[in-house]
Image: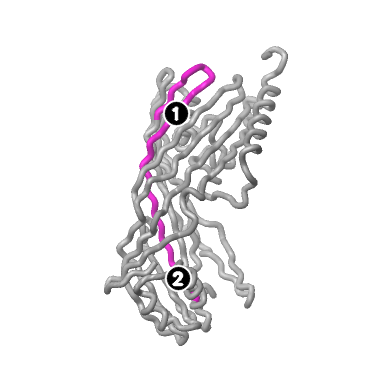
Amino acid sequence: MHDRYPAWTRFCVAFALTIGLLACFTQPATSTDLLSFEGIGTVPRSMGGTALAYDVGGSGMANNVATMLLMPLGQSVDLQLNLDAPNTLEIRDLATGEIATTDRSPVLHAYYSPNLDYVWRAGDFGLGLGLFSGGGLGTEYGHDSFLSRTPSGIDTGLAVSSKALFLRAPLAAAYQITPALAVGGAFEGVFAGLSLSDLGSADQLATLAAQGRAFGSLLPTIGPVVGATGGAYFSFSRPPEIKFGTDAFGVSGRLGATYRLDEGSILGISYRFRTLLPDLSGTTGRIVAISPGGDQVSLPGSFRVLDFQLPADFGVGASHQLTPDLLIAFDYHRTFWGGAFRELKVRFKADAGGISH
């Protein structure tokens, strides 16, 4: 069979079968998973996020652990510094035509996060230890856009922003079962940090309360102040860029395998488990009730983000070395957001007593 069909033909057949099987068991995606889209590590980011079926260096332990065995024998150490900052975003108020833009100097508010890995390879074994950022997401709209204005037209001067950073520290191992098949697995420590500051209008607060999605002993205190055209502002955010309004440490893990079809063609498969994180908690925050006339009543307290988990992810990839200088690669991912969380659940406890959700 190998003499009759060249390597490229066999690769195309395997690739087509893979896509066909995926099409039978999946539905069209309606959104993009920004946490996985860029990929983890310098090589995956330079290859459009693909990382499951070729040598990506030590960052393989954070993508498909089995790809560590595609690295040369010996030891390898890598250190990278990521600058994670959002592109310039614009939000338009359809009623007035006003536009709110994100910070024009994102470098000043970026996350500078490390990618650090060590890999040891000998014979059919590979071991690795690393620290990787899984996303530095956020927006900074400042305090002078329409997002900081109440329905009654009061400019509150309160900043609107969101920030999130996720770090994974895998301890990984891989084994070459046959010359074609390699498998691997990793146990991961996970850090999740989240900061959020937002202004909600009185009608939004009323709608949430009517739906049973906003409740607690503080609502009778906030409601009369907000009235019909005021607003409610909540913020759990800490100024230093390395700190977060809420955070937590937990665990996760991943499994992976590669199968070499021939010298230049590889198939890869990976599964990342859902995280096990406690509630994200913080010690500094506040809710500000804003009256229609602009008066502000501030309630300092602590926030807790409930049942927040990073989702499980299944991936299949393929690569082919067309020439010594040209590699093509393809990855497919199915991220199970429905098994992680469907909405952000936040609990606030005022320092003076009282709880709102």
The answer to whether residue 17 is above or below residue 340 is: above
Q: Quadrant of residue 115?
A: top left
The answer to whether residue 94 is above or below residue 46 is: below
Picture coordinates of residue 261, whole percent (x, y): 60, 21
The residue depicted at 45 percent of the width and 56 percent of the height is 110
Residue at label 1? 184
Q: Amino acid at mark 2?
A: Ala
* Residue 148 seen by the camera: no
The answer to whether residue 355 is above or below residue 296 is: above
Q: Quadrant of residue 9?
A: top right
Residue stretch in magenta: 173-201
Mark 1: few/some/many CA within 10 Å (<14, 14-19, 20+): many
Q: Amino acid at mark 1?
A: Gly
Q: Nearer the viewer, residue 321 or 17?
A: 17
User: Marks 1 and 2, how far apart in space?
Assistant: 45 Å
Count of numbered tags: 2
Asked if the residue at tag 2 contacts the one at tag 1, i.e. Cβ–Cβ closer than 8 Å, the answer is no
Picture coordinates of residue 184, whole percent (x, y): 44, 28
Report whether 91 appears left or right of 173.
right
Q: Quadrant of the N terminus?
A: top right
Farthest-out residue, left: 352
Please name the predominant secondary structure of the magenta segment in the image: strand
Among the two numbered marks 1 and 2 on one chain, the one whose residue lies closer to the N terminus: 2
Indicate which disc residue 159 carries: 2
* Residue 287 seen by the camera: yes
Q: Quadrant of the C terminus?
A: bottom left
Q: Nearer the viewer, residue 273 or 164?
A: 273
The residue depicted at 44 percent of the width and 40 percent of the height is 273
Q: Is residue 242 magenta?
A: no
The residue depicted at 33 percent of the width and 69 percent of the height is 355
Q: Quadrant of residue 289?
A: bottom left
Farthest-out residue, right: 4
